[in-house]
Structure formats: structure tokens, C-alpha cells
Image: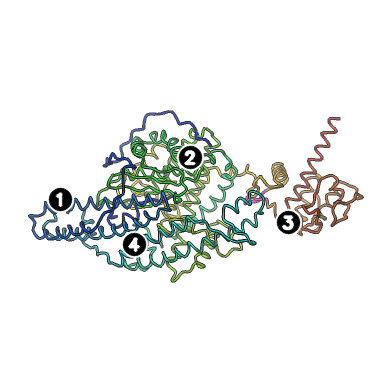
Amino acid sequence: MRKKLLSLLLILSLLMSLSPAALAAEEEARETDFFTDQYHADVDYADMAYRRIDSEPILKEMEEIRALLSDGANEKKVEETFQKFAGQFLEIVTMYQLLNIRTYQDVTDSEAAAELEYADSLYMTVADALILLIQDILESPCDSFLREQLTAEDVAYYTEYEALTEEQITRSAKETSLENEYMSAAFQIYTAEYEGRKWDDASAAAALAAGELDQETYTTISRAIAKNQNAAIGDIYLRMVSLRKEIAKSYGYDNYADYAYTEIYQRDYTQQEIRSFHQAVKEYIVPLYNALYPLYYYESDDPAFSGDYAGDIALDMIEPYISRLSSELAEAFSYMRDHGLHDSGYSDTKSDGGFTTNLDSYGAPFYFNAPYGDVFDLTTAIHEFGHYNNFYWQPSGWNDGSKSIDIAEVHSQALELFFTRFYEEIFESEDSAAAVQDYLILTMLSSAIINGCLHDELQQYVYATDNVTLDQINQEFCRLCKDYGLIPEDDERTEMYSWYQIPHTFTSPCYYISYAVSAAGAFAFWLNAQEDYFTAVDDYLKFTALDSTYGFQESFEELDMESPIDPAYVEDLADTLWEALEIDQRSEALPPVDLAGNEWFASAAAALYAAGIITKDEAGCIYPYNDATWTDAAALLSVLAGEEYAAKEEGKVITRVEFANMMAALLELADNAKSPFPDTDDGAVAALARLNLVSGYADGTFRPDQPLMRAEMWSVVYRTILSALSQLAGEAAA
């Protein structure tokens, strides 16, 4: 049973994650009736002001109530006062959330950050005192009014509760302080020095774009900046880890991740049980992602991706389709917009990310997002509204439970998937609709499922390792990146630093697995929607309307659906997505994965590939930067000659001058021309240069004995073909 009193602040904030088309014509809302009406104040967010609450009068009045408990005749007075306490507690939670929103809206607001630490301490103190008062009431003759509000499970929870110690309250306040320190540090600009110049990410990127830095140097500088940022933020994280291990021990847990899984998120699976899900993702989802990525890559220049969807733009775009799904969704959406309960516009002081929280005293959810300036802002708006709708319909009483984080993420991610039905109308283009759908599914496979598992594994390692060091974390992160296919297994790096870019690692430890398991569950609704869309939507609404007593796996069982963490389900999901997205058929027509299209040799490679002269391997690659071999050259020249061309030295790397001689012999060129290159007088090179079929380097050299790159070989052949075609065209014209 999830109780709001002590777990509320830990699980309440759900952190994530073209010119807009004209709005669709208004349609009558699709009437649904799955939810129970709740209280929602008719108050705008602009009028919800924070006020500091003093705990002393509340605690003093609680003591006065205790004096009445020995006489059952005082029950009415006890009941009235207790209800007032419950309302004050919800107000304390609401004040905390208003402050929390404020710190996200302006990370430079040190006053709000300091006040948030006070509000956190106040919350812990009053919540603890209220539970102890509940214990005393239940053990008194004034208990009947309270027992009428509680289940047997509730009564057991409250009577078995042990009071927080001063150390636990102090540690909670210290944790909030460290989170504020992290948010401030994450907002800073980090630098690295390279060859006497100080660089940051922005200046390095600008220099790369201007041609002042080559890709290799840029990568070196970027990694140095990341390492410095990793060191600064990693120091904060190590202090967090140490403190959280103390917190877990104070609640009787040997491992903080066990504590978080059980007490914070109240999952119906353990760390040990989720490890089989990790393995299934590596086996089935990673290959699916690798196959889908090239499809998205060649669609990623679609204008839909570069549009501005920040602020009200995204909300305007999705509003007509909300009502097509459900009149109840439309009601929640209208309440949000009518009362200004959202902030998704641009600001230089906003913290990264998005979340939805509930302002309990008002029965008013609030949606926050720091926009990225691309289509992610549109999908985030849909995602967060999934959370918003859940909060809008869930009870906000003092004893009402909150749903599992894993379930809440199904609410958001499944809604994103349902919206793909409307993409063609939203973007006014079939191609854009397909491109953004590929992007969404790719993001859910990668950012949600793959990264969710990866970062969960990383945190399991961190909290299970005694006296863990930053070097150990960076090394384990690198190993996991290879394990999950994010970098090649033979990558020479032994440590990587970018794990610090996940805010949840700092502010919501052990949260990230929720994205993975819930995305797997969200896909179940989407797959059903391919057969019967609105039946799947109604199943989703039933799922969302389930009360908080249902666990994650239990919720799927209630709808006769498979557990999303079952490895067999993961395998079926991958197979079904592979087939539904027609990955094999679509991949056949794609250019090679390792050809971006803007390389100096791109035209040659693309033309030869399209003509079937060069082919990609099973991984979809043509390896343009690899050294060419005699075998490669012979195969290419066989196509030009129209007959089998034997390799002089099978499998051995061929040099630039050796290939020049092969080409000159094939074309029957005279080798008596004068070489334009100072480092070779080879006649074949000279003959090819005279016809502009080969060229040298920027310093004027040819470098004859240097290994020939495959892309260089293709360029020579491509120029040869173009020259021949030009000659034929001239002869035809004559």
C-alpha cells in the first residue's frame, strides 16, 4: 500500500522526458466514462502563492489533541481537529511543490533553493508527527471515525510505523541540499584547455562548424570537457551515494537500491528479478534498435524535426486530437490550459528536463518542460499530458495512495504511441509522419528501454560497491555502453563520462528502470492498436483508471496482458516490431549506414552503390575509410573491364601508385606524361592526373606509397565513368 505521507515527495514529480501544421477541424469529443470525478480548485496557477508554514503551532496542537484521546466522548473534537491537520499536511506538500517548480523555472534562484530545504524538513517533521498521532488515535477510544476511513492494510501500516529519528530527518535535509548543489553545478559551463586555448562545448562546436577544428581534434576537446564536468559533478554524486547508503541502513536495508525499489517506488519486482529483463533487452531490443536507426537516420533531415514546438505551439497542435481519444482526456487538458497550469516556454534559467507534479491542496496538476527547440518538445508535451491526466483523475486525500512510477510512465509513453495515428494530419505529410514515428519508436527503444536498463545496471553496481570511486563508475559505464551496443566492443576507451547527463541519477535514484519496463508495457497497447485502435485506447483508459492498490505487473494481469518484464514478452515485442515496421524490406533500399551524404566522396560512393558496383555488408556498411586491398581493386576493375580481373596479391593492402598503375593499364594510357607531383615521377600517375582522374593532397604531394583508402579508389573509378559518359555524349552530339 503506497502511503502519501512519507513517500509523497519522493514519487510525486514524474521526470521525464517545421512550422506547425494547421489545427485539425474540430470534431465532437469521443465520450468515455472510465474515471471518477475529483475535486479541482477554480484557481489559476498565477494566483497560487507560496507561503512559509511554521511547524510549531501544528505540533503543539497535536499534543493538545493527545490529551483528549483517553475519553471517547471527545471523539468529535478529535475528528474535527484531525481533519484540519490532514488539510494542513496537504498544504505543506503543496507549498513544497510550488517551491520545487520555482527552482526548476530558475536554477539561479538561491532563495527558492534554500527555502526548499526548509520545506523538505518541515514536510518530514509534520508527516512523521501526523503518523504518530494516527497511531495514538487508533489505540484510543476515539478511533472509530478514523477506522471508517482506513482499510485493514492501512491500519497495519500506521500501527507498525516507527518514528523518524533526528538523524533520518537531518539526512533527508542534507539530501535535498546535495540535490540543489547538483542542479546548480549542472547549469555551469565547463571548459578544457587544448594547445594553450580554453574551450567550452559551444566554442568547440562553433570552431568545428567553421572548419577551424577537424573532427578528431573536436572529439579530443569534447572528451576533455566531459571529463572535467564528470569530475566536478561526480564529486557531488559520490557524496550523494554515501549519504543514501546511510539512509538505506537507517531504514533497515543493506543496499540503497533495494530500499529505493521497495520503499520509494514500491515495485512488484526486485533488482534480482529485473536482471533477466536487462539480458533480454541486450539480446532482442539492441539488435532491433541497430536495424531501425538507419531508417531514421535517412529521414532525420525531414522539416518536421526542426520546427519550433515550444510553449503553446505543441499544446495547440495536440488539443484537437485529445478529444478524439476521450472526452475525459479533453476535460483534463482544458483544465490545464484554462488555469495556466503549465510552463513549457523558453527561458535561459530553466533546469533541463520535463516533469508533471500535483498541487494537492488545489487538486491541480502542473506540467513543466524546458524546450529543446525541436520535435522532442511536441512528443514531450504528449508524454507529460499522459502524467497530467493521471494526476487529474486520482484522489488527492491525505490517505490516498499514489500509483507506481512504472505504471505512471505507461500512461505517458502509451499516449505518445497512440498519437502516431494523427501524425499525418499534424505534419500534413505522409513522409514526415513516418519519419517522426520512426523517431518516436527509436527514442523509446533507446532512451527508454536500452538506456533505462543500462543506467539501472550502473546504479545497481554503484550502490552494491563498497567505497565506490569515480574511476570505477566511469569504467563500469564504459563497459555497459559496449554491452548495450552504444559503442563498438573493440572501442579503445576503458572509461566514459557522460552518465552524469542523466538528472534522474542525482534527483531520482534508481528511477530510470521505470522508463524501460513502462515503455515495454506501452508498446503492448500500441501493438493492440494496430488491430483495433479504439479498443486499445479504451484498454489504456481502463489501465489508467485502476486504483493505486494495483502493482505494475498486477495491472497488466488485470487486463489479461502479459508482464512487460517477462523475457519471453520482450522477445515477442522485438519480433513483432521488426515485422510491423517492415525493417527488413525498408532496409534493403537504404544507402549504407556509414555514408552520411556530405562527405567529399559521397557522390561517388552513392552512385556506385546505386549501380550495384559496391555493396554493403550485413551491418549495412561499406567502410569508406578502410584501406583498400588488391582484392577490392580487382573486383572494382572487373566491373569496369566487363571481365574477370585477377588480384595480384590477394587480400594485401594496395598503395596509391599501385592502383594508379592498374587503372592506367586498364585504360591503356601512355605513361610518358610529366608528373605534376614533386614526390613521384610515375608515368601512370601522371597520365591519370592529366585526365583529372587522380588528385593530390593540399600540400601538392601525391604520396604514392601510402595505402589507398577505399573512398579514394571509388572516386577514381567514378571520375573514370563520368569521363567515359561525357566522351560518349560528345560523340553522339557530333
The residue shown at (84%, 31%) is 732
CA neighbours of label 1 inside 10 A, class few (<14), some (14 to 19), many (20+): few
Q: Are marks 3 and 2 in contact (CB under 8 Å)?
A: no
- The residue located at (45%, 31%) in the rendering is 23
* Circle 3 residue: 627
Amino acid type assigned to the residue bearing label 2 in the image:
Tyr
Q: CA distance from mark 3 to mark 1?
A: 83 Å
Q: Is residue 319 magenta?
A: no
Residue type of the residue flagged with mark 1:
Glu
Mark 2 and mark 4 lie on one chain; the one further toward the N terminus is 4
Q: Write down the residue under mark 4.
A: 173
Residue wearing tag 2: 309
Circles 4 and 1: CB atoms closer than 8 Å: no
First in sequence: mark 3 or mark 2?
2
The residue depicted at 45 percent of the width and 30 percent of the height is: 24
Extent of the magenta region: 616-622
For disc 1, the marked residue is: 80
**Helix, strand or loop at disc 3?**
loop
Q: Main secondary structure of the magenta part?
A: loop
**Mark 2 or 1, nearer chain start:** 1
